[in-house]
Amino acid sequence: MDNQKILEVHERQLKFSRLLAKIGQNNPIGKVIRLRAYFLDLPVLTKQWRDYLYVRKERISDKFLGLDQGIIHTSYADAKRLVETTPQQRDNYLGPLKINARSYFLGHPLCLGTNGDEHAGIRALFFHALPEPEEITEVLAKLVDEELAKATKPGIIDVKTDLPKMIVALLHELVLNLKLSEEEIAGSVGYIGGLGLATVPNLIHNTLLRNKTRSHIQHRQGLVDTYKKSPKYQDYLGFGATHQLNEQQVANNLFDMIHVAGTAGTSDLLASVFGVLCQDEALRANVSAEIDTVWDGQTPPNAQTLAQLELTEKVIFETARLYPPVRFLNQMSTEPMEVEIGGQRCPFQKGTRLVASLFTANRDPDKYEEPDTFKTTRDYRDLLSWNGSNQERNCPGRALSIAIVKLFCLYAFKHYQWRSVSGVEWDMKKFAPFKPNLVLNGFARRAN
């Protein structure tokens, strides 16, 4: 992608912003202008997203315009301020992309796009549904071991395709006590992979893309109906009712929690942790030594076992800093404002999208020394991955996600082995799920 193109598209967006300030961004003409700006910028972002961020950051300023006239904040200080703003006004975005086709979600907004009491109720449901990992460590360990054991039959793990299958199966058993069929697991992974299709307008989604999305929508409806068979379903319905959530809201938000936040986020992080450890032999040896020290491999691991994995936890944190599964967080401005962008004072209306770029914030040299270097000696108390630690925004599944990654490391390095690995590489160009190219060949259980 030509760097000049990245800057030219931004210059057009600045012109659009001045026009929108006069006519309003939500009247019919304003919506057409925003849509045009969105599709001018979309190819620039998706083809070379890292250059999109850094060229604009270095040549314009720490703040610049992005998709749908959003103001992208790239510094750690600005991103932290946005993440910790309360209360937060949301809209239906997944990262920097707007979810235009609600039919992909059976007519429901993402939980990330809800506000006020409904948002509070959905978060409460998630905290209710997600168990505390220290209370179910042995159960979780058994599920992790079972998923890894499945990979010994083909004798290979492709982290891009196989880890999402493992996590989606594990989370359905953990949250709903449901064992998915291989067909359902494949359908769920396909649904996650097709999320980008939901960013086009609903009319196009339901006509030109109908053949591509029909199976995904049918899978979601079928699985939501299957949730009714869960022994925990009535408990979730009752809890949701106390927060004014109806049955469709409860079932569909559980689906999004498991698929969008749980499977996509945790499998991406786990894949990156495996990538880091397969890339650095000395670090892998130190992690393996720590695992041997805290666990004999015979008795089931417990909460204390996981707590003793201090180096492993730092590897997880540092991986989440350098390769965050969630690269952008969104909220909407609650009042009109004027922002300086590239030396120009630009007026913006209430409802303007404010975007925290976690990828650049996590690599801000004003915050982290040698920000692009993997170092496990950092202070992670204010790490912005998992949406920071603020109660309004923090990820409800943070502790569970970390525990799952620890247990995969525990079992993979203690009970399993592999003959060779492919080259480890993160794609810094295409805007795709953030996980490395990595295949573990000759994957097998160790002899006792």
Image (spheres, rainbow, N blue to C red):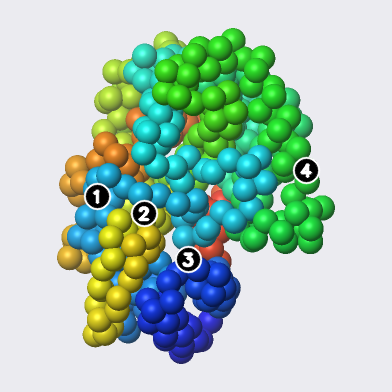
Relative side of 375 to 402, left or right: left
User: CB atoms at circles 1 and 2 under 8 Å apart?
Assistant: yes
Q: Amino acid at mark 2?
A: Gln
Specify which label sits upstream in the sequence, 1 or 2: 1
Residue assigned mark 4? 215
Mark 4 secondary-structure assignment: helix
Q: Position of residue 431 (x, y in %)?
A: 53, 63
Residue assigned mark 3? 26
Residue 365 badge? none
Specify which label sits upstream in the sequence, 3 or 1: 3
Q: Amino acid at mark 3?
A: Asn
User: CB atoms at circles 4 and 3 under 8 Å apart?
Assistant: no
Residue at position x 55%, y 37% in the image:
256
Q: Position of residue 196 (x, y in %)?
A: 61, 56
Q: Nearer the viewer, mark 4 or mark 3?
A: 3
Q: Nearer the viewer, mark 3 or mark 1?
A: 3
Specify which label sits upstream in the sequence, 4 or 3: 3
